[in-house]
Amino acid sequence: MRRVLAMAVAALGIALGGAWAARADNRPAPKGPDEDGTKPALVKIAGEGMMDSHAFQYLTELSDDIGSRVTGSPAERKAEEWGRAKMKAMGLENVRTEKYQLWRGWTRGTAQAEILEPIHRALHVDAMGWTGSTPAGGAEGEVVPVNLFDIEEEAKHASRLSGKIVLVMSYGTPKRDEDSLFAIFGDFLKAAGKAGAIAVIGGQAGSRASGLNLTHTGILGFDGDFSVPVVSMTAEDQGQLERYIASGKKVRVRFNVQNTFSSGPVESANVVGEIRGREKPEQVLVVGAHLDSWDLSEGTTDNGTGSASVLASAEAILKSGMRPRRTIRFVLFTGEEEGLDGSFAYMKQHHAEMANHLGDLVLDSGQGPVKEFMLGGRDDLVASFRPFAQSLASIRNIAVNDKVENGTDTLPFSMAGLPGICMDQDSPDYKYTHHSSADALEAVKPEVLAQNATVMALTAYWIADRPERFASPWPAEKTAKMLKAQHQDVMLKVFGLWPKEFAEAEKKEETPN
Ligand SMILES: [Zn+2]
């Protein structure tokens, strides 16, 4: 999902823990594919993945034939069926959908805006996901700025926003980090809606939308829905409003935004298929990406590229004829864009077999080549993973670190103490295609996609097949400590996602015995 408040706040430094520290003991050096017996299989898989890839064909079908697929919508259901049919046709085992409920469904209608004063012309806007509507036929009002960096105070004085159009800007210095601001922004939107604000211009809350004449939709919290219409406005149009406001001019705008919420929860499903392990089939590595998308374009780079990679990586392994020691479970998650709902549902549904999981491997950073393996908080695995990454050197140099990625389906696995491995990509254009009308097939190079899918297949096979088990879940106490060290705790707490076991572990830590 990635948070959509793309603010100009310096990213917090991330402690790398002991990842780079020299090995203090005399354990033998970790083995890569050249020493651990996995190399012949990997060579075959690489051949299939690079020479006979269907990744771009899958991506084309998903983009052009199915198109945008918002979780819980008929198009998303069609994508589930498509994914299931592909998995079956290529010969995956135990192909199924695993249903769960999304708290509420949402359908985009229309979003129109025009500036009435001091000049008159149309403005370019799109509604943010899971936000509401103006009265039928629209409403007009004066534009009033609020400061994101002082958003708690703004929420307290929300009554002044009654009958106004709210323009979210940011000036001064933030008192909080980006993640907590994002959470508190939700509280502000609730207050503004209650006060009777007509609409909020705040898709990028306080910064301009990236790209030429582009808007970027998205969710405004984990499972966050808001009755007040919130829109993303193009940088050019928002800039003009901001300049009028700064020069003290009175600005009037008319909005007509129409969206529909479902009356209750809606059904969605993750799509699952497996290559069963030959020796320890009960041990499972999840290889995943999210099938759902936003709806301003085709959802190609977010996350058609990941979905096509999951399917193509499965196919490369199947066609190689090699069967790994442990099970590889390929999962096309849904509900990711609404708050990682599909992967959180997976953790619940598979709770009983979590001790047998090895982690998950996810590609969801756009259209560029894979540049680093983020091992999702597991600094203890960096040394054993590095020889594998080095074995890919003739395909691409890929770095290894222990960082946590909280913006995609890796997070629930990292929270379970498992390596939620993000195959982070070098995607400089992703800031334009992300959730925008530019998220289409034009943005993707077939050869980069095939290479990413091959790297995914090789990584999955190596983890599942190496003689030693790659990872077991950490206990809650250790996981909570790691998440704090990686500055994930503040965000998880403000969104109410910090589990009870973590809170208890923290208390124990604080109480001297
Ligand atoms: Zn995504």
Image (tube, rainbow, N blue to C red):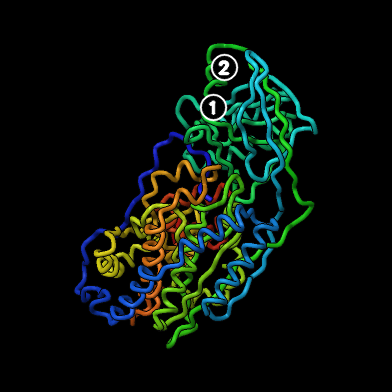
What amino acid type should be assigned to the residue bearing mark 2?
Answer: Ile
Q: Quadrant of residue 234?
A: top right
What amino acid type should be assigned to the residue bearing mark 1?
Answer: Met
Nearer to the camera, 158 or 116 = 116
Q: Are marks 1 and 2 in contact (CB under 8 Å)?
A: yes
Nearer to the camera, 27 or 236 = 236
**261 shown above or below 382:** above
Q: Earlier in the sequence, mark 1 or mark 2?
A: 1
Whole-angstrom CA distance, mark 1 to mark 2, is: 11 Å
Residue 452, given in percent of the width and then of the height, sits at: 39, 61
SS under mark 1: strand
Name the residue furthest bottom.
279
Q: Label 1 belongs to which residue?
A: 169
Q: Label 2 belongs to which residue?
A: 245
Residue shown at the point (53%, 36%) measured from the top left: 214
Nearer to the camera, 49 or 217 = 49
Nearer to the camera, 176 or 461 = 461
Regarding residue 237, the answer to whether it shows in the image is: yes
**175 shown above or below 292:** above
Residue shown at the point (48%, 66%) measured from the top left: 310
- Would you call the spot at circle 2 few (<14 residues within 10 Å), some (14-19), or many (20 or more)? some
SS under mark 2: helix
In the rendered image, the quadrant that contains the C terminus is bottom left
Is residue 368 rendered to the left or right of residue 500?
A: left
Residue shown at the point (47%, 56%) measured from the top left: 364
Residue 400, given in percent of the width and then of the height, sits at: 31, 60
